Image: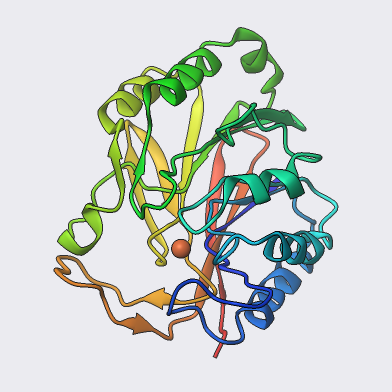
Amino acid sequence: MYILHFSDFHLFAADKESAHPRADTVAAVEKVLADAASLTPPPDLVLISGDLADCGSAEDYALARQMLALFDAPVLVVPGNHDRRDAMRAVFSGTIPFTPEPFLNFDMVHKGIRVIGLDTIIPGKVEGELCAERLGWLADRLADEKAREETTSGVTFFMLHHPPFGLASPAWDWMTLTAGRDELRALLAGFPGHLRLLTGHVHRPLITSFAGHFAAIAGSPAFQYAPGLGWTSEPPLSAEPYVYWLHHITGFGDVITSPRMIDLG
Ligand SMILES: [Fe+2]
């Protein structure tokens, strides 16, 4: 089974909210999606770890849904700091089993693969948090025996926009998951299954671990930052190829993760 992990499309139908997204962001994302849709076999799940839109208008999400319709597989999203909960919920609540307002959390199993999505945003802020309500919801879900039994692949993807780990960079670390990190680490460390954490926000592809589990950050087709550690101010942009992740669940319960690189010019 194949699971695609994208992030930070920053799609905009008309106006941009932030300065960096390339003028041809829609064309760049179309190129990425066309590449992904051409893979054989086709993906079983498409996961997008936030900042689907640049300013979160209803038109942005209508455009996103239209562009993502080329996949037969379920497309699951969590909000990023540039998304807007209400507009995102309005467009995707028919296909993603979001929890009731205000948060856009979900927990679902598809073809024996479990995906838990966690809303980490603070409206109006760049950084993220997990409040007591969201941590409580997650604790209940992680303890749910029925969901574990339905996860016949043995693999759970855990998706959130803000990385819950430091990035060895003062320019980045203040805007990661700034509250609830230790509580999240404790919850995930006790999870008995094969869990893989997927995030975005950083606009660079990275792999690390968190609470003993594999963790990946997907890049952004809208704009990418230069590599390096220790940045004390915003890193320069980079024209490197965009990277998304392809997770292949083998018949042995393992997951092979490979980067898929797309030159966007
Ligand atoms: Fe972003």
Whether residue 214 is visible here, answered yes or no, is: yes
What coloring was used for the rendering? Answer: rainbow
How many labels sit on residues? 0
Q: Please state the horizontal and vertical placement of residue 202, each as a whole percent of the image.
A: 38, 61
Whether residue 44 is visible here, answered yes or no, is: no
Which residue is located at x 60 percent, y 79 percent?
25
Q: Please state the horizontal and vertical placement of residue 58, each as a whole percent of the image.
A: 71, 59
Quadrant where the C terminus lies? bottom right
Q: Is residue 25 left or right of residue 166?
A: right
Up/down of 264 relative to 36, above or below: below
Q: Is residue 49 left or right of residue 65?
A: left
Which residue is located at x 59 percent, y 63 percent?
53
Q: Please state the horizontal and vertical placement of residue 235, each as a whole percent of the image.
A: 26, 75
Residue nearest the viewer, comparing 9 with 247: 9
Q: Please state the horizontal and vertical placement of residue 149, each as a whole percent of the image.
A: 67, 13
Residue nearest the viewer, comparing 90 with 238: 90
Up/down of 77 relative to 36, above or below: above
Which residue is located at x 66 percent, y 49 percent?
88
Among the 4 quarters of the image, the one containing residue 97: top right
Quadrant where the N terminus lies? top right
| Residue occupying the far top of the picture | 145
Which residue is located at x 45 percent, y 54 percent?
81
